Image (spheres, rainbow, N blue to C red):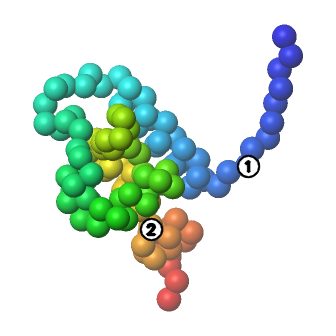
Amino acid sequence: MEISSKLILVTPEELVSLIQHSVRQVIAEQTPKSLGTADKPLSIDEASSFLNIPKSTLYQFTSSRKIPFQKIGKKILFFKADLIQWVESGKKKTRKEIEEEVFGKKGGLR
């Protein structure tokens, strides 16, 4: 059995993001899905309303595979949990958060 090893360099922020994503994924896989409304698939109209974006933008995101979706025949469906996770994954840090990471809680750029 041959073991192949590769060295991958990541920043501490990237490592935290990878760990958070992995933990969310494991939790999602281990959490039993109920048949309640939270897990009810959303139509394109409902997803557009939920995200407060035009349907045309949503169609662009699906065609470029920038957003998680399911397709059954010609019908496109979305799950709220997937949409929330997608929105959270694109969160940009504030200047204050960046300064705290670089200089710690007490320091900062002035």
Secondary element under disc 1, as helix, strand or loop, is: loop
Instruction: Please give the name of the residue rendered at 13% of the width and 36% of the height, measured from the top-left corner.
Output: 37
Q: CA distance from mark 2 to mark 1?
A: 22 Å
**Residue 17 position (above or below residue 58):** above
Q: Where residue 53 sits: x, y (%)?
A: 29, 66
Secondary element under disc 2, as helix, strand or loop, is: loop
Instruction: Please give the name of the residue rendered at 22% of the width and 55% of the height, measured from the top-left corner.
Output: 45
What amino acid is labelled 2 in the image?
Answer: Lys
Which mark is on residue 34?
none
**Residue 73 position (above or below residue 46):** above
Which mark is on residue 93?
2
The residue under label 1 is: 9
User: Quick one: 83 or 26, which is closer to the camera?
Assistant: 83
Tell me: 4 left or right of 11. Answer: right
Residue extending farthest to the left is 36
What amino acid is labelled 1 in the image?
Answer: Leu
Residue extending farthest to the front is 74
Quadrant in which the N terminus is drawn: top right
Tell me: 73 left or right of 92. Answer: left
Q: State which quadrant residue 52 falls in.
A: bottom left
Instruction: Rate crowding at label 1 as few (under 14), some (14 to 19) or many (20 or more) other CA atoms within 10 Å.
Output: few
Instruction: Rate crowding at label 2 as few (under 14), some (14 to 19) or many (20 or more) other CA atoms within 10 Å.
Output: few
Q: Where residue 40 sits: x, y (%)?
A: 19, 36
Instruction: Please give the name of the residue rendered at 54% of the width and 44% of the height, measured from the top-left corner.
Output: 18
Is residue 81 visible to the viewer in this orientation of the structure?
no
